[in-house]
Image: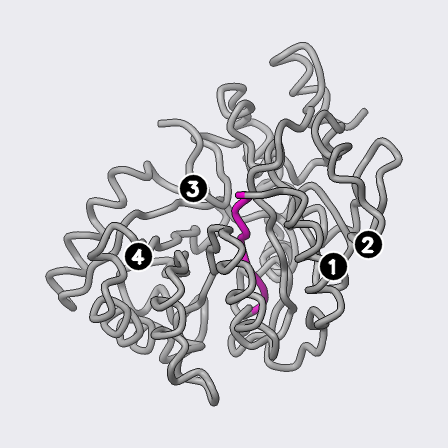
Amino acid sequence: MNTFDQAVRAGQGDGLISGEVRIIQANLGLLCNLSCRHCHVEGSPRRTEIMSLETMHSLLRLTEKLPGVQIDLTGGAPEMNPHFRFLVETLRAAGHPVQVRTNLTVFFEAEQADTPEFLAHHGVHLVASLPCYLDDNVDNQRGGGVYKRSIAAMRRLNALGYGRQDGLPLNLVYNPGGAFLPPDQKTLEEAYHRELKERHNVDFSRLLTITNMPLGRFFNDLQSAGKAESYQALLQDSFNRDTLDGLMCRHQLCISWDGSLSDCDFNSVLGLSLADGLSRHIDNIDPEKLQGRRIVTGGHCFGCTAGCGSSCAGALVA
């Protein structure tokens, strides 16, 4: 039993158990046009790992057994997978809500010119990374010129209705620029709305605050600065039992680019497979056994329970 399991059991009397699968998060590959300093999967233009068409068909077969489940597509830059549009079209035709995690700047890459129109046409929901409303902070974390291109992308999306129509949400993601926890989500969202409107006349739907996990490039930066231990201590000391009910792993299944299965994207990075003897690969999983499984945890899980909590949908408690 690890320290996180001990904290959970002290808080609720038992370990984490999964409920009904509501979201399938599929990582379409580590290829990305950016190399962000906080990226836990270490995506970059040099990465060659992408989800194959064969694995996508396996994903589609699984979704047929889980009607109505939301599909959350991530990466890397998921749009750069050569089979991205096939997957989106097929999922939407089958009635699945589809959400894409975009870095916004990918829309200016080769062969992506009409991607915003494609997404809007299929009613795809968007979650976009914009770790600050100020240009210097964004460019420092994500690369030179990223802020300017991100704002330009938001203008294009606004023109299509994203962030301005109920059926086309454009949610932004904030993550801290250092070894500290996110501020209050509601207060920061108000500042984002005000600043982005006044500075650039762009709109978005909601702001999601997400804690940096001590993994990937962010962990490397922590080690280089001699802050890895103190940051882990901050996460652990900030454990909030009230976040446990809302943890994303309890209602999510994560599929890596190679078809391997885990409880969340962070576990996938660490090579932590599903527990209770369940299959490690999508081709062999029995969806009826997903509910009620034990959630695999580790010290990194304190990142999701620190302070107001953190998930792919933002803070867990006020």
Q: Earlier in the sequence, mark 2 or mark 1?
A: 1
Callout 4 crowding tier (Cα within 10 Å): few <14, some 14–19, many ≥20 = many
Tag 3 secondary structure: loop
Q: Report the residue marked by disc 2.
A: 283
Q: Identify which residue is drawn at 17% across, 57% down.
A: 195
Callout 3 crowding tier (Cα within 10 Å): few <14, some 14–19, many ≥20 = many
Point out residue 13 in the picture as x, y percentages from the top left corner. Answer: 67, 10
Residue in front for this viewpoint, 109 or 144:
109
Do residues under tags 2 and 4 come within 8 Å of each other at their CB atoms? no
Q: Earlier in the sequence, mark 2 or mark 3?
A: 2
Tell me: 150 left or right of 200.
right
Q: Report the residue marked by disc 1.
A: 58
The stretch of residues the image draws in magenta is 68-76
Frontmost of labels 2 and 3 is: 2
Tag 2 secondary structure: helix
Q: Earlier in the sequence, mark 3 or mark 4?
A: 4
> Which amino acid is tagged 2?
Asp
Q: Inspect the magenta stretch and tell me whether residue 7 lies in it.
A: no
Q: Earlier in the sequence, mark 2 or mark 4?
A: 4
Residue in front for this viewpoint, 15 or 60:
60
Point out residue 267 in the picture as x, y percentages from the top left corner. Answer: 71, 46
Q: How is the image coloured?
A: one colour
Q: Report the residue marked by disc 3.
A: 314
**Quarter occupied by the C terminus:** top left
Point out residue 305 in the picture as x, y percentages from the top left corner. Answer: 54, 31
> Which amino acid is tagged 3?
Gly
Point out residue 215 in the picture as x, y percentages from the top left corner. Answer: 65, 53
Dividing the picture into quadrants, the one containing residue 161 is bottom left
> Which amino acid is tagged 1?
Ser
